Image (cartoon, helix red, strand yellow):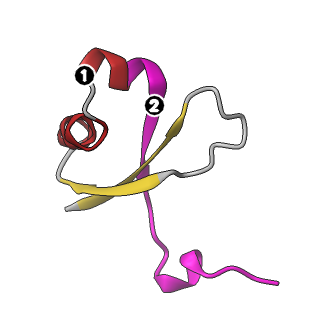
Amino acid sequence: MKEYGYSHKLDSSNEILGHIMATSLLEAQQKLTIIKQLDIDSIVQIFKITEIVNHGEQGRRYKR
């Protein structure tokens, strides 16, 4: 499974709102329809879903 993140298309900072584990982008979209209780067309219009490529846990740590 791959990890996908979703954000609002209108958000210029592309802040990730949540994570979805799925085998494909289509499956991630389908899972987001359940989470947000919207149809697939609304999901495509409102959200941008991207695959998150981890470089180990180091990529998830925040530096101060």
Give the left or right position of residue 44, taking residue 24 as reference.
right
Pick the quarter of the image with the C terminus: bottom right
- For disc 1, the neighbor class at 10 Å (few under 14, some 14 to 19, many from 20) is some
Q: Is residue 1 above or below residue 57?
A: above
Q: Quadrant of residue 28?
A: top left
Stretch of the chain drawn in magenta: 44-64
For label 2, the SS is strand
Q: Quadrant of residue 43?
A: top left
User: What residue sits 29% from the left and 15% below the top?
Assistant: 41
Q: Label 1, on which residue?
A: 40
User: Is residue 48 in the magenta section?
Assistant: yes
Residue 47 image label: 2
Which amino acid, by three-letter code, is at mark 1? Answer: Ile
Residue 13 position within the rendered picture, expressed as x and y whole percent measured from the top left? 71, 43
Q: Is residue 46 above or below residue 21?
A: above
Residue 12 position within the rendered picture, expressed as x and y whole percent measured from the top left? 72, 34
- For disc 2, the neighbor class at 10 Å (few under 14, some 14 to 19, many from 20) is some
Residue 47 position within the rendered picture, expressed as x and y whole percent measured from the top left? 45, 31
Residue 32 position within the rendered picture, expressed as x and y whole percent measured from the top left? 28, 40
Which amino acid, by three-letter code, is at mark 2? Answer: Phe
Give the left or right position of residue 5, taking residue 34 as reference.
right
Count the labels in the image: 2
User: Is residue 46 in the magenta section?
Assistant: yes
Q: CA distance from mark 2 to mark 1?
A: 10 Å
Give the left or right position of residue 13, taking residue 2 as reference.
right
User: What residue sits 54% from the left and 34% below the top?
Assistant: 8
Residue 17 image label: none
Q: Quadrant of residue 29?
A: top left
Question: Seen from this angle, which residue lies furthest front?
Answer: 37
Mark 2 / mark 1, whichever is N-terminal: 1
